[in-house]
Image (tube, helix red, strand yellow):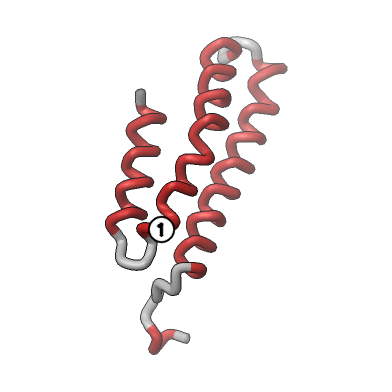
Amino acid sequence: MVTLGTHVLAFAAAYLQPGLGAFAPLTLLAAPFAFHMLNFAGENHRVPIKIKPLKIYAIKWHMAFGFALFLMTLAAGVDLHGAASL
């Protein structure tokens, strides 16, 4: 349920931001991977040998998702820090 809520928030934030509305559906591409990751963690959270790779995968996933959001804002032409900072 938390995963669904966070993806809805990410979609809404992108959709409501001027210039990002057309790119908002791209945030939903990460949802199946997040559900899979959480299901695996729920089934194996007491097995350290299995959960260690998941922690590394989770870090990589969050970095990739954050970078994708950053690229989305750049592709949409949104000023991240204002024109004066460039």
* Vertical placement of residue 67 versus 50, above or below: below
Spot occupied by residue 30 in the image (x, y as percentages of width and height): 52, 39
Label 1 belongs to which residue? 22
Q: Quadrant of residue 6?
A: top left
Q: Quadrant of the N terminus?
A: top left
Residue 80 visible in this rendered orientation of the protein? no
Residue 34, x across and y down, in percent:
52, 31
Residue at 53% across, 30% down: 32
Query: Tag 1: Cα neighbours inside 10 Å, few (<14), some, or many (≥20)?
Result: few
Determine the residue positioned at 63% across, 43% down. Answer: 60
- Based on the displayed image, in which of its 4 quarters is residue 21 positioned? bottom left
Please tell me which residue is depicted at 64% across the width and 27% down the height of the picture. Answer: 54
Task: Point out the residue furthest to the bottom here.
Answer: 84
Residue 48 placed where, x, y %? 66, 16
Q: How many marks?
A: 1
Name of the residue lying farthest toward the left: 16
Residue 45: image location, x then y, percent: 56, 15
Is residue 86 something that shows in the picture?
yes
User: Relative to 67, is 54 above or below?
Assistant: above
Q: Nearer the viewer, residue 19 or 51?
A: 19
Up the image or down, 16 lies above or below 58; here it is below
Secondary structure of the residue carrying numbered label 1: helix
In this view, the residue farthest toward the front is 22
Q: Residue at x 31, y 61 (%)?
A: 17
- Give amino acid for label 1: Ala
Q: Is residue 44 above or below residue 30?
A: above
